[in-house]
Amino acid sequence: MRKIKTCDIILNILIPIIIGIFIYKVAAYIQLPLFIRNQLPDGLWAYALLSSLLIIWNRELNIKWITASFIFFIVFEVCQFFGIISGTADLLDVLTYFVFGTAALLTNKYFLITLKYKS
């Protein structure tokens, strides 16, 4: 079970976060399309967050935590809008969070079966 979780963590948490960081670093040196530069890293991090919650719960859906993470996405952008945290509040960011978060939920069953999680 430990190897399964390690593989899951690398594939669904570490790789998306590393790709997001890479995009931010590369964007400082080369011109990237706006979606790739601005929204893709946010989406990858939303995917990693939802994936981490699913992995913690052995890929069983915990509606309270999933709902809390989607609320967190909205609150994060609202805090940016009011200047509580730095950043630019953007509805496209919220949409991106929801799309990538939903992608994590939709791929959950695949990883549950493929990695053979045991309850």
Image: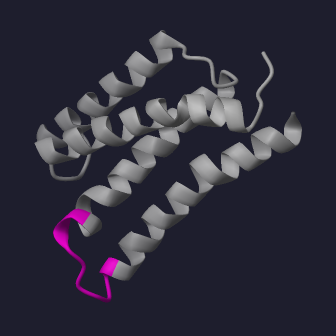
Residue with the most extreme bottom position:
29
**How many callouts does the rendering have?**
0
Hey, which residue is sitting farthest top in the picture? 64
Q: Name which residue lies at 31% across and 23% down.
A: 71
Residue 2 drawn in magenta: no
**Can I make out residue 90 in this image?**
no
Q: Quadrant of residue 106?
A: top left
First to last magenta residue range = 27-35
- Where is residue 59 shown, x and y percent of the image? 64, 25
* Left-right relation of 31 to 14: left
* Residue 25, placed above or below residue 79: below
Q: Residue at x 20, y 74 (%)?
A: 33
* Whether residue 110 is situated above or below residue 61 in the rendered picture: below
Q: Indicate whether 42 appears above or below 49.
A: below
Residue at 21% x, 46% y is: 93
Q: Position of residue 80 (x, y in %)?
A: 19, 42
Quadrant assignment, res 62: top right
105 above or below 81?
above
Residue 119 position, x and y percent, is 78, 15
Residue visible at 51% across and 57% down in the picture: 17
- Which of 16 and 115 lies nearest the eye of the viewer? 115
